[in-house]
């Protein structure tokens, strides 16, 4: 699951149209999930656009972006986390028409959900279940 929070109007029109599917594709790749309909349907993304004046810093009002990613504990190694964060940051910068010089304006928070605390369809879903699905 991915949630992008950004000030309204901070993304370019083209970036706004594509960022959610881009983020989902990036996450699936770094998780090592297969690129198939089932796993694409499980890669939910949310875009939360904040109203004018709802985001600022003590320094300026330039837009900042928060990307929150929730994955099962153990789904990402340290190497995969680093690659994911780098590629997610680049994707958000591209969608906002910004450059790598603005990278500190994108924060990525990875939330690791403990096994047995994630459920879907009325059932607990464990990392082992997802690994089994990916191998089919």
Image: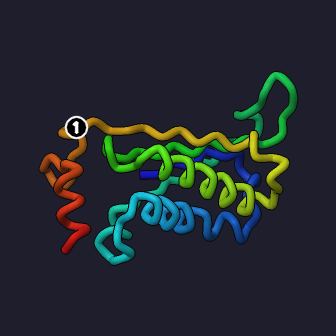
Q: Residue at x 35, y 72 (%)?
A: 34
Q: Residue at x 74, y 62 (%)?
A: 94
Q: Residue furthest top?
A: 58
Q: Residue at x 47, y 46 (%)?
A: 69
Q: Residue at x 48, y 63 (%)?
A: 24
Report the front residue among 41 and 85. Answer: 85
How is the protein colored in the picture?
rainbow
Side of 16 where 127 appears, left or right: left
Q: Classify 10 Å Cα crowding around label 1: few (below 14), some (14-19), many (20 and above).
A: few
- Residue 111: % across, % down: 43, 38
Report the front residue among 85 and 50. Answer: 85
- Total number of numbered discs in the rendering: 1
In the figure, residue 66 lies in which quadrant? top right
Side of 68 where 107 appears, left or right: right
Q: Where 86 sits versus 25, above or below?
A: above
In the figure, residue 107 lies in which quadrant? top right
Point out the image quarter for the C terminus.
Answer: bottom left
Q: Residue furthest left?
A: 123
Q: Secondary structure at mark 1?
A: loop
Side of 108 where 101 appears, left or right: right
Q: Residue furthest bottom?
A: 36
Residue bearing mark 1: 117
- Residue 33: % across, % down: 35, 66
- Residue 23: % across, % down: 54, 61
Report the front residue among 129 and 95. Answer: 129
């Amino acid at each position: 699951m991915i949630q992008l929070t950004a000030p309204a109007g901070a993304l370019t029109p083209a970036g706004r149209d594509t960022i959610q599917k881009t983020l989902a594709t990036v996450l699936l790749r770094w998780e090592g999930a297969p690129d198939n309909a089932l796993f694409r349907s499980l890669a939910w993304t949310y875009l939360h656009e904040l109203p004018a004046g709802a985001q600022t810093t003590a320094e300026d009002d330039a837009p900042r972006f928060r990307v929150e990613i929730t994955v099962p504990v153990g789904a990402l190694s340290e190497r995969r986390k680093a690659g994911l964060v780098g590629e997610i940051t680049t994707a958000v910068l591209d969608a906002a028409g910004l450059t790598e010089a603005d990278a500190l304006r994108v924060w990525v928070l990875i939330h690791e959900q403990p096994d047995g605390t994630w459920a879907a369809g009325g059932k607990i879903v464990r990392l082992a279940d997802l690994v089994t699905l990916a191998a089919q």
